[in-house]
Amino acid sequence: MSATPFLPFTRPSIDEATVSGVAEVLRSGWLTTGTHCRAFEAALSAYFGGRPVRVTNSGTAALELGLALCDIGPGDEVITTPLTWAATGNVIARRGARPVFVDVDRRTRNIDLARAEDAISPSTRAIMPVDLAGLPVGREALYDFASSYNLRVIEDAAQSMGANSNGRRIGSAGDLVSFSFHANKNMTCGEGGCLVVSNEAEAARCERLRLQGMTRDADMNMEIEEISGKFNMTDIAARIGLGQLSALDGFNARRHELARRYFTTLEPSLGLEMPVADFEQSNWHMFQVLLPLEKLMISRGEFIRRMLALGIGIGVHYPVTHLFAAYRRLGWKDGDCPHAERIGARTVTLPLFPAMTDADVKRVCESLAMVVREAAR
Ligand SMILES: *Cc1c(COP(=O)(O)O)cnc(C)c1O
């Protein structure tokens, strides 16, 4: 009997041209921010319809820069979703502002803008929505909401590279848009990110804030008007990103095919709650189902262990932010965002990445069916 190979929940696809491109950068004598970062920014800008783009060393950094560009700080409130990677709430809190968590829509699992009205206060300055799993928050409703309360928008589009809202590519319109090129995202630099801004003045400020707030004149005199940190990308990472960007549309097309296959192969009788079957706008960053835990004799943890024993990696994205200890100390508690809490407690991420085969999807579905049937009450 041959051992079944392990199937992770995600894995990046890096082509050989990118591998040798990185080797060239390593031999070039210049590793930090340089010509490859500028080339990557130009390619990203073209992808986003010509808007100015600045690359960063992470998606988190791009979000922090976005908040800094909006001058968000102590005393300010930023509306966001609790059903996201911890970075979203953390960047707001780290600027000294208060993250205000609004519950999600049960179906889309994204921030429920109808509820966001109740979260508005005189201190509300901005909204930071997240396109969970690559399913975009509707941008028309989002910007209608933002303009009626005079809010800046920092789109946490970390997961929605290549997705669109009503035919409009995410990043090609709107206020500030932040992306992540973390190793698990639809395209990667290893670690990296970028911020799409509105005009060249904002881009220039972003560039200063990206590296200590420093400016230099022609005589190499240095000046700092605004203190900042270190958020710049390396040319090594940018070279990976350039290779990934040209493959992105192909990656996303394959993700769509695999997601469709999950919909046709997963048995409805298992009682899983499925994601929205959106093949127009989503980039299918993740395929997430909710386990019918009340009908099972096992916990989510045990489900994950049993899948692992069958050679299948399962992810959890995400436990809700507002119930982490540090956020409870800010006053958040159980029941504040009931839909998000319910989803966060039972969501599992099934394997989905471009190099997966159709047979892999079948194997995941069969293993999942076996584990759920065996555990049924
Ligand atoms: C990945 C991610 C981030 C952070 O990106 P990093 O590159 O890991 O810093 C922020 N928000 C969301 C929703 C993410 O998925």
Image (tube, rainbow, N blue to C red):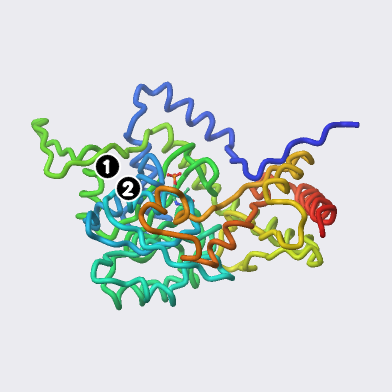
Q: Is residue 36 above or below residue 374?
A: above
Q: Nearer the viewer, residue 374 or 308?
A: 374
Question: In what element is the residue under mark 1?
Answer: helix
Q: Mark 1 vs mark 2: which is more N-terminal?
A: 2
Q: Residues within 10 Å of mark 1 (few under 14, many from 20)?
A: many
- The quarter of the rendered structure image containing the N terminus is top right
Disc number for residue 297: none
Residue in view at x 49 percent, y 61 percent = 334
Mark 1 vs 2: CB contact within 8 A: yes
Q: Amino acid at mark 1?
A: Arg
User: Is 41 left, or right, of 150 in this rendering?
Assistant: right
Q: Nearer the viewer, residue 93 or 48?
A: 93
User: Is 245 left, or right, of 277 in this rendering?
Assistant: left
Q: Can you identify the residue that label 1 sits on? A: 210
- State which quadrant residue 229 falls in: top left
User: Is 355 left, or right, of 220 in this rendering?
Assistant: right
Residue in view at x 79 percent, y 60 percent = 265
Residue 189 x %, y %: 47, 39
Residue in view at x 24 percent, y 56 percent = 72
Residue 98 x %, y %: 31, 58
Residue 161 x %, y %: 49, 55
User: Is 270 left, or right, of 108 in this rendering?
Assistant: right
- Whole-Å distance between the Cαs marked 1 and 2? 9 Å
Q: Can you identify the residue that label 2 sits on? A: 54
Question: In what element is the residue under mark 2?
Answer: strand
